[in-house]
């Protein structure tokens, strides 16, 4: 399963739908000018008019109701993101209202079709046709707000990357420039995808690691998300970040121990503790850029981690590949333990 929002259709606004109806209707009238002779043809013409309006309204509503995922069936990861981007309640309300509108339009159409067909006179058939179309259009108009809401907001959901929340996931965290993307690229067995994520301007690297025929593990980095203290975040950002807790798997936290690392040990430790506190997930720690190590920093961080009771720490160079296999093996072991 990938993003449920990947293949969403474009939803037209209310005015666009009305415009389409007006154009088709006019075409129908122009196309039949001078051709409607005899009572049977005249009645067929009335039916045709009713059909034209009904078909457009019903198709547009169906497109919305049948293609948008039903909120309660969306995985919590994607549901949380939908909530931050669109609003859970408004989305649910709009889809529910339009589903009801679709049923109502069908009902009106069926009964008026019957009336137009069986009216004793052509005059009455015309009157029913007019009334039927009027009622269908008024249902559409009453739901204008919901149609426009979805038309305006659904495109935002496409910004959500195709992460499979059912697949085990390695979430790579750490402050900016510590080497998250480099690590994801290094451990991926296929070329990684670059995807946007809500509320960060940076792209996220999404890699896949094929373990065997049955097991594929995802690896994602979290630029602009898990890279500074969570208490500095506004509630919306925080919700987008916390959606990550619904992904199965392990967090790999990277410390940068290089000489030209921009962040202090204290800053890196603060973000680390924040993540430990907020995420109920196994966390594996790796000290990166060992090829350019600042010995003093390195020892300090190890001491700090030990004081936190973390004895198992990997030292790696994501860029050069040192220690990466050992790290990955351990992470996969932890993943297997969490799966069983
Ligand atoms: N010397 C050394 N440099 C590294 C290593 N890993 C990454 N770098 C460099 O560190 C810089 C940042 O690496 P990225 O992988 O882009 O870091 P990031 O954490 O994804 O950065 P953001 O996306 O900005 O948060 C790049 O210039 C990398 O080449 C390493 O193991 N050793
Ligand atoms: Mg990056």
Image (cartoon, helix red, strand yellow):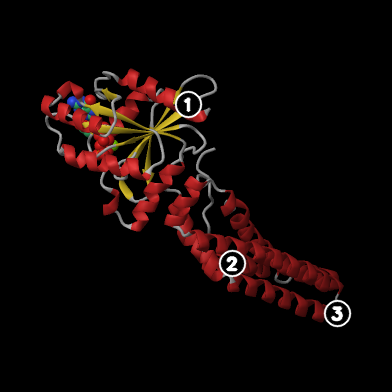
**From this viewpoint, is residue 38 visible?**
no
Residue found 19% across the figure and 29% down from its top: 303
| Tag 2 residue | 23
Task: Locate residue 104, reporting x and y percent.
Answer: 70, 68
Residues at circles 1 and 3 in contact by the CB criterion of under 8 Å: no
Residue wearing tag 3:
121
Secondary structure under tag 2 reads helix
Vertical order, 44 against 181 (above or below): below
- Closer to us: mark 1 or mark 3? 1
SS class of the residue under badge 3? loop
The circle drawn on residue 28 is: none
Residue named by callout 1: 337
Frontmost residue, 217 versus 149: 217
Q: Residue at x 23, y 27 (%)?
A: 288
Distance of mark 2 from mark 1, alpha carbons?
Answer: 62 Å
**Ligand 1 lies in which image quarter?**
top left
Height in image: 309 above or below 317?
A: below
* Real-space Cα separation, disc 3 to disc 2, in angstroms: 28 Å
Residue drawn 28% across the image and 41% down it: 273
- Give how far across and how far down residue 61 sits, in percent: 62, 60
Mark 1 vs 3, N-terminal side: 3
Neighbour class for label 3 at 10 Å: few (<14), some, many (≥20)?
few
> How many other residues sit within 10 Å of disc 2, few (<14), some (14-19) or many (≥20)?
few
């Amino acid at each position: 399963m990938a993003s449920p929002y990947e293949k969403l259709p474009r939803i037209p606004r209310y005015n666009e739908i009305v415009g389409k109806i007006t154009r088709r209707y006019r075409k129908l009238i122009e196309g039949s000018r001078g051709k409607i002779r005899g009572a049977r043809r005249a009645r067929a013409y009335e039916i045709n008019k009713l059909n034209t309006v009904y078909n457009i309204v019903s198709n547009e509503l169906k497109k919305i109701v049948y293609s948008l995922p039903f909120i309660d069936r969306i995985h919590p990861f994607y549901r949380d993101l939908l909530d931050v981007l669109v609003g859970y309640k408004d989305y649910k309300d709009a889809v529910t209202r339009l589903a009801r509108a679709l049923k109502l339009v069908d009902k009106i159409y069926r009964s008026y079709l019957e009336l137009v067909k069986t009216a004793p006179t052509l005059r009455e058939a015309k009157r029913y046709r007019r009334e039927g179309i009027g009622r269908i259009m008024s249902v559409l108009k009453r739901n204008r707000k919901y149609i426009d809401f979805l038309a305006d907001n659904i495109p935002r959901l496409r910004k959500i990357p195709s992460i499979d929340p059912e697949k085990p996931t390695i979430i790579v965290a750490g402050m900016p420039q510590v080497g998250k993307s480099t690590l994801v690229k290094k451990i991926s067995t296929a070329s990684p995808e670059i995807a946007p994520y809500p509320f960060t301007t940076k792209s996220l690297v999404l890699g896949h690691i094929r373990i065997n025929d049955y097991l594929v593990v995802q690896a994602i980095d979290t630029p602009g998300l898990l890279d500074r203290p969570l208490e500095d975040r506004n509630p919306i950002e925080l919700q987008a970040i916390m959606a990550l807790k619904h992904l199965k798997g392990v967090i790999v936290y990277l410390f940068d121990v290089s000489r030209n690392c921009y962040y202090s040990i204290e800053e890196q430790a603060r973000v680390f503790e924040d993540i430990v506190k907020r995420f109920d997930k196994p966390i594996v720690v790796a000290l990166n850029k060992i090829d350019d190590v600042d010995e003093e920093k390195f020892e300090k961080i190890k001491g700090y981690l030990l004081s936190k009771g973390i004895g198992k720490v990997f030292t790696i160079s994501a860029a050069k590949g040192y220690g990466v296999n050992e790290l990955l093996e351990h992470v996969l072991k932890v993943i297997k333990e969490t799966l069983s």
